[in-house]
Amino acid sequence: MSRKKAVKGKGSSNTPSSSPSSDKEKGKKVPTQSNGVVHPSRPSLSNSGEFYDIAFKVMLVGDSGVGKSCLLVRFKDGAFLAGSFISTVGIDFRIWDTAGQERFRSVTHAYYRDAHALLLLYDVTNKASFDNIQAWLTEIHEFSQQNVVIMLLGNKADSTHERIVKREEGEKLAKEFGVPFMETSAKSGLNVELAFTAVAKELKHREMKEPNEPKFQLQEYVNKEMKGVGCCRS
């Protein structure tokens, strides 16, 4: 899936960040990196003039048409874009939106290697996209980092009358593979912010936790947040 979208100053699929050589030429100090994590003093990719302490690469993956780009646009811009779509492989806001079509699969494989988190989507109105989740997970385990954060998302949950895949089926599949799960809707905003926030909290906890600090329970956090807002977080 995915749509045409202009990436304004946030890099491209070939150059996700500024090169060390260009920084040196400008007399700037190049920040050190560890395991792909960018550390302090690096400017924000949003061109807002802000700075961040750490940055992680999050990928959205799944079959074509499941709503990956819509989910990204909803999170970043708070908008839902309807219309005609083309397959995209793009980068925006350090969140990578990949194409689900087979001809782009080799490109997606290359991006797996340094991704810190993967949001794996299926469409609740499309049984085939749900059935293909196991194949996606097999690829993820083959090509991604061993400790990558994975979250399963059943998207288009607003499509009540067209729904084919029950919520319970998604929950069961997630338990089988030991990954957190929630349903989302790019159209209504259901759980979109929560999905990205939960993954960000998990990644931050891994990077900054003290040796004796307990492990962050991602699914417990998700369940607590959804219960607090009646499962309708936007």
Image (cartoon, grey):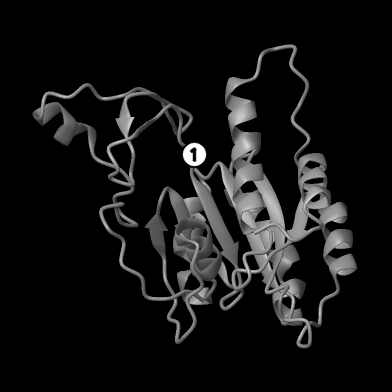
Rendered residue at 38%/23% (across/down): 40
Q: Quadrant of the C terminus?
A: bottom right
Can you give x and y, in whole percent of width and height, for residue 193 in the image?
60, 53
Q: Is residue 105 visible?
A: no
Q: Locate residue 93, reporting x and y percent.
A: 41, 50
Which of these two is toward me, 49 or 146? 49
Q: Quadrant of residue 166?
A: bottom right
Q: Is residue 212 above or below residue 67?
A: above
In the image: residue 10, left or right of residue 152: left
How many marks overall? 1
Q: Nearer the viewer, residue 195 or 63?
A: 195
Residue placed at 74% from the left, 61% from the top?
Answer: 232
In the rendered structure, the answer to whether residue 135 lies left or right of residue 170 reads: left
Q: Could you tell me residue 213's position as x and y percent?
A: 74, 16
* Relative vertical location of residue 3 with respect to residue 181 in this rendering, above or below: below
**Mark 1, secondary structure of its residue:** loop
Crowding near pointer 1: few (<14 within 10 Å), some, many (20+)? some
**Relative to 103, residue 138 above or below:** above
- The three-letter amino acid code for the residue at tag 1 is Phe
| Residue 63 in view (yes/no) | yes
Q: At x 57% / y 78%, what residue is drawn?
A: 65
Q: Return the residue nearer the eye: 11 or 111.
A: 11
Residue beneath disc 1: 56
143 left or right of 124 in image: left
Residue occupying the point 30% across, 56% down: 12
Compared across the picture, whether 97 is left or right of 186 comes to left
Name the image quarter holding residue 21: top left
